[in-house]
Image: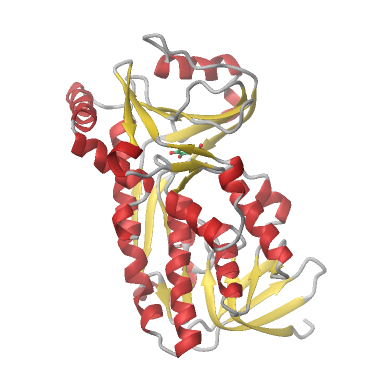
């Protein structure tokens, strides 16, 4: 093989999802160089449908760091959600309970804003590379990759940020003896659709029913995003529109509420699990976002956690390059994991409280309704949910 072309930077970033691009943006603003390497094409990332809720802290990061204020103009502020069970909806009023809101703004738009900002600022982002691998992470980190034209590179860097998503190559390079993996599997998945229909409700509805969970979310005036709990082995092709709408009707309709139906333009089965790899750092490799942890989707914490990792990691790099101190980089993993485990707890709790296991006995079902009633009938219960959903304000 011909020799690799050697290029250098300060921070090599694996992955051009929101975590990788946000890190590159923050570094650039602080005068720190980075090169982002991504296996997928820009188009492929733009076409992936992901979750849609941003905590206020994530919105502030996008706006205050100068990525874009499009979220404020085109996103929708939500001051609460509805928990629905036993055919009745109960509002969790975020503003009243914790004085915060969240924004409905799909992850795809966050990616488009970040990639446009990197482009406008002359950032070096290599999409659609082949065979990107990392090497020598303990002392002289490098990334080997082949670009779209077939040129082989060796990218040498001071550090590598592994923001390469839930099937991370980076996390697998941390020696087994030096890391621990935590898993929790769930006996259900989500069936996600996009449908051409008006909004069914002003706010998101998280519905528990004997037939399983459903989430009525939104996208625009004319297209809506909704999910219902299904078996992980389900094949989306076996579900025609009538069967899909039947699943929603049997979980959310009743007492004057009816989901608004329309043509289904996208359908996918989304498998999920809880996963953490700790520590989030080995040598000169730092993991961020889904590369280090995934949460079940209930409550939409994934992207928010990734952006929080990046904020903490950026502070570490900024401090190192301006003072030479590694103290914040050394504290990165513990600092980030504090919030990661809170979000793991919240996502696990929301998932187990709202979904119905196929083999649930009468006791489990009645206990679950007792739990839901406990939450909605107590201001403290509602406030706990509101605080976690909007993003743990007290920590700012
Ligand atoms: C969406 C996804 C979620 O997991 C959630 O909790 C709320 C909204 C969404 O895609 O709109």
- The percent coordinates of residue 297 (x first, y second) are 43, 42
In the image, taking residue 348 as reference, residue 299 lies left or right, namely right
**31 over 289 or under it: above or below:** below
Q: Would you say 366 lies left or right of 315 here?
A: left
Find residue 80 and report its horizontal and vertical position in percent. 38, 34
Residue 384 position by quadrant: top left
Please report the residue visible at 58 percent of the width from the left and 24 percent of the height from the top: 238
Percent position of residue 11, x then y:
57, 78
User: Which quarter of the figure is the N terminus placed in?
Assistant: bottom right
Whether residue 46 is visible here, answered yes or no, is yes
Query: Position of 170 compared to 118: left or right?
Result: left
Residue at x 66% of width, y 52% of height: 112
Looking at the picture, tell me which residue is in the foreground, 347 or 145: 347
Please name whichever residue, 221 or 185, is drawn nearer the observer in this view of the structure: 221
Relative vertical location of residue 218 with respect to residue 182 in this rendering, above or below:
above
Give the residue drawn at x 48%, y 79%.
317
Residue placed at 61% from the left, 25% from the top?
Answer: 195
Evaluate whether residue 174 shows in this view: no
x, y percent for residue 372: 24, 29
Residue 13 versus residue 233 in the image, above or below? below
Q: How many marks?
A: 0
């Amino acid at each position: 093989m011909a020799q690799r072309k050697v290029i250098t930077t300060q921070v090599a970033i694996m992955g051009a999802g929101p975590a990788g691009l946000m890190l590159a943006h923050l570094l650039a603003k602080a005068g720190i160089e980075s090169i982002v390497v991504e296996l997928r094409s820009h188009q492929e990332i733009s076409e992936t449908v992901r979750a849609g809720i941003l905590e206020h802290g994530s919105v502030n990061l996008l706006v205050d760091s100068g990525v874009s204020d499009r979220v404020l103009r085109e996103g929708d502020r939500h001051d609460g959600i509805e928990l629905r069970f036993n055919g009745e909806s109960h509002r969790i009023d975020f503003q009243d309970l914790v004085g915060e809101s969240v924004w409905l703004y799909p992850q795809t738009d966050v990616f488009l804003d970040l990639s446009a900002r990197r482009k406008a600022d002359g950032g070096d982002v290599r999409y659609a590379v082949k065979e990107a691998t990392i090497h020598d992470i303990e002392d002289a980190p490098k990334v080997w990759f082949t670009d779209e034209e077939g040129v082989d590179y060796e990218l040498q860097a001071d550090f590598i940020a592994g923001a390469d998503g839930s099937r991370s190559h980076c996390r697998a390079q941390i020696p087994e003896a030096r890391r621990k993996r935590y898993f929790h599997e769930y006996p259900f998945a989500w069936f996600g659709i996009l449908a051409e229909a008006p909004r069914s409700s002003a706010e998101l509805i998280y519905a528990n029913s004997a037939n399983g969970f459903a989430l009525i979310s939104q996208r625009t005036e004319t297209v809506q995003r909704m999910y219902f709990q299904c078996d992980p082995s389900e094949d989306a092709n076996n579900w025609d529109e009538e069967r899909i709408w039947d699943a929603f009707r049997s979980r959310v309709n009743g007492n004057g509420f009816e989901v608004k139906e329309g043509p289904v333009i996208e359908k996918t089965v989304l498998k999920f699990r809880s996963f953490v790899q700790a520590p989030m750092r080995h040598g000169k490799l730092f993991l961020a976002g889904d590369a280090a942890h995934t949460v079940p989707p209930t409550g939409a914490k994934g992207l928010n956690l990734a952006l929080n990792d990046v904020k903490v990691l950026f502070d570490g790099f900024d401090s190192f390059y301006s003072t030479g101190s590694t103290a914040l980089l050394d504290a990165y993993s513990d600092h980030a994991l504090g919030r990661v485990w809170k979000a793991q707890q919240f996502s696990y709790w929301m998932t187990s409280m709202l979904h119905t296991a196929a083999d649930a006995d009468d006791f489990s079902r009645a206990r679950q309704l007792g739990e839901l009633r406990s939450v909605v009938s107590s201001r403290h219960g509602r406030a706990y949910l509101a605080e976690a959903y909007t993003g743990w304000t007290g920590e700012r």
